[in-house]
Image (cartoon, helix red, strand yellow):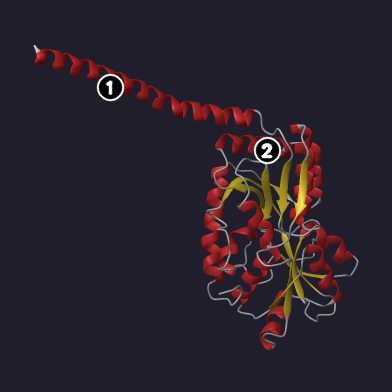
Amino acid sequence: MARREMGGREMAGCKIVSCCIAVLAIHMSLAPAKAASDKTDLAQNFPSQTVKIVTPIGAGSAVDGLARVIAYKLQEIWKQSVIIENRPGMPGTASVAKSAPDGYTLMMMSNGHVVGGLINKNLSFDPIADFQGVIKLASVPLVLVTTPTLPPNTLQDLIALAHSKPGQLNYGSAGLASTSFLSAELFKKITKTNFVQIPYTGGTDALMGVQRGDSHIYFLALNLTTEQVRSGMLKAIAIATSERSSALPDVPTFAEAGLPDYQYDAWFGAMAPANTPVPVLNKINADIRRVLRMPDVIERLKAQGFELTSSTPDEFNELMKSDEKLYRDLLKDTKVGTP
């Protein structure tokens, strides 16, 4: 009899345990669905407060100009403040990497971002692993310009002068990891020349440097080049496009000037801290796409020299990884950066 009673108790206990397991299983199965629902709700309500866009390249740069146009329109769409914070250099990028991954801190940057870890081994962040692409926004054709007092008027003459004076000519850049830095380093490698970098605090200072003759050459955005060349403030040597530009019809492409291997895509894009929820990323991406389709934005950005593009977050991630590998090979033999 005692055995039967014990068996009954065991069976009752088993039923209770089974019931608890079943309830736990239901809760566990519902948890991912609830988490997904919460993220979707977060995206639908985004943004509910001020959004900050950090630009790690100084005011007056192409990055800064692009960020301000986008921010103004997003502010209208979101009915929330969108502020631009200029924090030049690696500290600005680090601040975004360490920000909460909630979509309220974004970064606008050029393709120079991907080489941060290649030129500085002591970074507190990983330019690839600690960031999530939001969207590739645009590309800008670059023009190789020189200070007016530099004798060469052609690309081949400039290269010949650099070969005859190794280490005596220099190039201006808006700082390490900027587009002007990376495009010049690529030029150095292809031409086997030894231009010395003069880093400035931003694009405006770098432009003034080559105008004054403090630096000899500079890779300048096409829209900023036109008036400078027409006024005699700069000399345009070659343009990094597949065809000549109607804005500078007398300036040859690099291929026409005898350097077909020089090809450079100066892209610009928006990024967020890694682990930002996918629904939030997709909403920001969709809203920026909406901005890029606005006729007044198209007109304004084209006037600034931007060629508008677009991408999904995943496509932008793949582009950054691909470029990081490309520029790792480019810079591995240079002495730029820290050990």
**Comparing labels 1 and 2, the label whose residue is closer to the camera:** 1
Q: Residue furthest right?
A: 231
Tag shown at residue 314: none
Tag shown at residue 289: 2
Q: Quadrant of residue 292?
A: top right
Task: Residue at 73%, 61% (x, y): give it.
Answer: 88
Left or right of residue 129: residue 296: right
Under mark 1, the amino acid is Val
Where, quadrant-wise, is the C terminus in this rendering?
Answer: bottom right
Secondary structure of the residue carrying tag 1 is: helix
Left or right of residue 85: residue 35: left
Total labels drawn: 2
Vertical order, 9 against 108 (above or below): above
Vertical order, 278 against 193 (above or below): above
Q: What is the crowding at mark 2: few (fewer than 14 residues within 10 Å), some, or many (at least 20)?
A: some
199 or 233: nearer the eye? 199
Q: Position of residue 162 (x, y in %)?
A: 69, 83
Circle nearer the N terminus (1, 2): 1
Tag shown at residue 17: 1
Under mark 2, the amino acid is Arg
Q: Quadrant of residue 257?
A: bottom right
Q: Position of residue 83 (x, y in %)?
A: 77, 45
Mark 1–mark 2 distance (CA, rounded to whole Å): 53 Å
Q: Position of residue 56 (x, y in %)?
A: 71, 57
Residue 259 appearing in the image: no
Secondary structure of the residue carrying tag 2 is: helix
